[in-house]
Structure formats: structure tokens, C-alpha cells
Amino acid sequence: MTRTSLDLDELVERRMLLKDERDLVSGTRDATRLGLAVPLTFSTQYGRYLRGWVELSGEDVEFVSRQVRAPAPELGMHEWTGQTVEYHRAQIRGQSRTADPDQSAVDR
């Protein structure tokens, strides 16, 4: 997949956290906050969970990291398997904009 550089309008459209989403991630530490916020913005845009981190651009991560005030390198310290990710998926499913990203992809 070839990526082109995004302008600010595209980043805002793709990765801007809404107030309820900011509230959801606000109570977590840096790596966890970013590890929840990035997949949340992805699932909001695409209606599914990330299949891998290659689906993200550095611009996406940087833009979200500035919103949640967590350094982008912290994303590398986040656990991507196990209970943390499962808990994040449950939180994302609980958001009103995406009821169940994986199920909606299956239904199509």
C-alpha cells in the first residue's frame, strides 16, 4: 500500500478525537492512552479494528499523539496482545459510533 503525505484537513477528518473519545482515553497512562486512541480513530474511520500497524502512517500516529499528549514513541511500549488489547476493543465497541467493528466487516 503506497501512502501519500496527508494535509491537515485529511488528518482532522481521519484522526480527530471527539469529546467522548477524548474522555474515554483521558484516564490512562501515556502508552496505554495512545494505544487506545490510535485504534479508536482507525475503527471510527474504517468500521473495523486494525489488522496490523502497517495500516497506519507516522502522520496518523503523530496527529493522535499530540491530541492525547502522549509521545508517539510510547506506542512502541504498548502491549498489542492479551488482556489490554481485548479491554481496548471492548471500550471501542462501547463507543456509539462503532457498535462492533469486526462484526460490521463480516456483515458486508
Image (cartoon, rainbow, N blue to C red):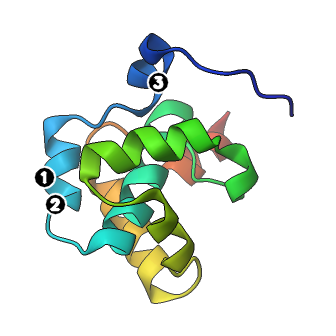
In this view, the mark in front (3 or 1): 3
Task: Give the CA separation, mark 2 to mark 3.
Answer: 21 Å
Task: Give the CA separation, mark 3 to mark 1.
Answer: 20 Å
Q: Residue at x 71, y 58 (%)?
A: 52
* Residues packed near mark 2 inside 10 Å, few (<14), some (14 to 19) or many (20 plus): some
Instruction: Determine the residue located farthest toward the right in the rendered image.
Output: 1
Residue 21 in the image, given as x and y percentages of width and height? 23, 46
Residue 55 in the image, given as x and y percentages of width and height? 70, 45
Q: Residue at x 22, y 72 (%)?
A: 28
Q: Which residue is mark 2?
A: 26
Q: Amino acid at mark 2?
A: Ser
Instruction: Determine the residue located farthest toward the bottom in the rendered image.
Output: 82
Q: Amino acid at mark 1?
A: Asp
Q: Which residue is mark 1?
A: 23
Marks 2 and 3, the one that precedes in the sequence: 3
Q: Which residue is mark 3?
A: 11
Q: Are marks 1 and 2 in contact (CB under 8 Å)?
A: yes
Q: Amino acid at mark 3?
A: Leu
Residue 102 in the image, given as x and y percentages of width and height? 58, 52
User: Compared to 57, does 7 lie above or below?
Assistant: above
